[in-house]
Each structure stands twice: as C-alpha cells, then as structure tokens.
Image (cartoon, grey):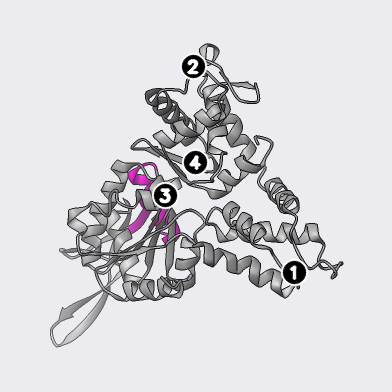
Amino acid sequence: MIREIYEEKLQRALRTPGLLTLISGSSKSGKTVLYHSVIDSTRMIEIFGSHIRTQDDFWKQIAEKLDIPTEIETSVITGSEAGFSREVSGSVVVAAGKGSMQTKRIDHDAQKEKKLRSNNQIIDALIRGDKVLVIDDFHYIPQDVQLYIARILKSALFYGLKVVIVTLPHRADDAIRRNADLSGRVRFIDIEPWTQQELQKIPKTGFDLLGVSLPDESMSLLVQESITSPQLMQQNCLNLAYILNVDEDPAVNTVGNIELIKRAFVFTTRDLEFYDSVLQKWTQGPSKGRDRRSKYKLLNQQEVEIYQLILYALAEDPPSTSIGISDLQRRIASILDRGVRVPAPLTLSNTMANIQKLLNELDEMYRVIDWRDQELHILDPYFLFYIRWTKLK
C-alpha cells in the first residue's frame, strides 16, 4: 500500500459516523506520526495504554485531558415569603400579581452540594466537543480492562463518539477484532512493515546527495540491521556519515568497507545505552531459585544461565522480531558447545513467562517483548538492534 493512502483512510474513517478506527503496526512503524498528521491537536484527546491498569485509570486519563474535575460543586438555594416556598437558582424571583408582574426579593438559604463526575459526563463532553479519543499502546492494557473499554465504546459510537485505537499487529485481534458487538463498526488500518525497497530509498537518497555511493553489500547490511524500522535506518546512516566525515572530506565517494558500517552500528548503540538496565534485569531473572540454575557452555567456552542464553540466541542472525519456540531452540543449539543439551520447550516457555512477568512489573521502557502462544514478539526493534551490536555480541 502506498503510505499516503494511510492518511486518506484515517481521514475517511473519522468522517464516517459510528466507526471505530483500529491502527495496527509494528513498533516504530509510524503509527503515532500517522494520527498526529491527520487529527488536529485541538480535537485530539490522547491517552496511553501503558498508564491504564484499571477501569478507573481509563476514565481518569480522559477526564484530565478534558479538564473535568473529580467533583462538581453546585449551589441549591431555597427561599420563602408569605406562605410562598420553592427551590430557586438565585435570590430574585418573578411572581404574578393582578394586572402586573411584580419582582419580589425573598430570604434564601444556599446549600452547596458536591457530585462526583460520571462516566456519562465524560463521554458527553467528548461528543459535544467533537473530540477524537485516541488510545495509543492499547496492547499494554490488561485484557479484562480492554474488554470493558470495548463495551463502553460500542455504546458511545452509536451516539457519535470518534475513537482511534493504536496497537501492535499480533495483539490487534484481542478485544477489538474478536468482539462480535463491534462487527461492522471498525475500520482497520494495518501499517505494513517497510519493505527492503522502501528502506533502501533512505540511504540511497541521502548518500546520493552527499556524492557517496553504496555497493550492494553495504546496502544489504544497512537494510538488514534496520529491522524494518525507517528511524533506525536513518540513525545508522547519520552515524555512518559522521564516520566518513563527508562534510569535511568531499573526496570520500564510496562506502565499500563493511567494517566502517559495523562501526556505525556500534556508534548507534551508544545512543541506546538505557537498554543496559533492561539487559541487567533480564539476565538476573527472578530472585527465586537464582542459586540453583543450570549453566550452559557456549561454543566460546563461556558458561551462562538460561536467561542470558536466550538473549544470545535472540542476537543471532538473521534479526527477527517474531521467533517461535522451535526457532528459539534452533538458535540456542547453534551457539551451544558440542554435547550440551538444548533446553526443552517447557523449560524455555516457563523461562520466557518469567521474563515477561518480571519486565511487565517495571516501567514502560522495560516492556520490550511479548511472549504468547509459544511465540516471542520483540516489540522494540531498537532493543533487538542493541543486543546484536552491544557488548553482548
């Protein structure tokens, strides 16, 4: 699909009453850029799934963006005169007399009442303000809360609420795609991974302008290590240009040295050193049973525990953001010393479940993987790039 069409599809969806728009695509594929380019900032109410753990979190985020207070204070005024008694909204009332209208001042008592904001008030404010509710990182929301939100949105769509949900491809079929109540009410925008041809345009365009040519081998390596991410490709190309020093040395006109490109990759990892804390948590694993873990000898004679063993396997060629358990076993077998037994599928599955639980209990930056249905999904291509080109390698 031509990438400009994504914007057209989103524009049409937002103009169609009663539709929910689901944008799915891999991390760093341009999902956020897409909806920010189409939806005016004054209309957009943007909330994030990484901050939603409960139903109340969902409503609180929206209310804060709409600036709706938790409590609403109202005044109730009662007054009386000569047997006349009624509840009024102020201190002056108009009474009918014979042949004339008379304005009479009455004594009154004001009582203040506090009412908690309701969920209906929040939905009504979104609709009346012609706002677009955007729920980014929907995949981070617990499944029971996802289902709750889906039920709420089903009713609100009927009354004119505009909603955009942003998620990952392998999670996009959870509470939305499989919800029968939303059948026919969802417009899907699936952002395809960048192809090799699309990624090649980035270095070709940039280095052509600098008068630098890239041999096929150099181009292939840049494409492979971008891991379908245009942002990662741009960052690697920038570091390669610095290494070549093309601004100061116009005589540089070709990049045929693969080692220079690999050096650029190492430079890129220096901008990603915050992933070190992720690696530390990963390799340590849960504290329970840490003293009883088995050791596995690698081809280089290094001995590692299973948590580090899995990281080494993920760093092997080719880079892939989706790895099934049989492929994981194959990768592990390729780096183990002769005669060392590959961990059984159940052992690997339990280990990955432990890693998932450990990382999910930490801050958002640690949520770099999703282990489900015996398949590992690496959510952040930068994390995969980092473990391939940092000291782990």
Q: Where residue 344 sits: x, y (%)?
A: 41, 23
> Is label 3 in contact with label 1 (beta carbons under 8 Å)?
no
Q: Badge 2 is on which residue?
A: 288
Is 346 rendered above or below residue 249? above
Q: Residues within 10 Å of mark 3 (few under 14, many from 20)?
A: many
Q: Quadrant of residue 22?
A: bottom left
Of mark 1 and mark 4, the one earlier in the sequence is 1
Is 203 rendered above or below residue 100? above
**Magenta stretch containing residue 251, yes or no?**
no
* The C terminus - image quarter: top right
Tell me the kind of residue under disc 1: Val
Q: State how far apart marks 1 and 4 are (Cα).
A: 38 Å
Residue at the limit of the structure toward the top, as seen here: 292
Q: Badge 3 is on which residue?
A: 49
Of mark 4 and mark 2, the one earlier in the sequence is 2
Q: State how far apart marks 1 and 2 are (Cα).
A: 54 Å
**Magenta stretch containing residue 73, yes or no?**
yes
Q: Residues within 10 Å of mark 2 (few under 14, many from 20)?
A: few
Tell me where the magenta segment starts and ends, as one range.
53-74
Residue 367: which disc?
4
Residue 212: which disc?
1
Q: In front of the other: label 3 or label 1?
A: 1
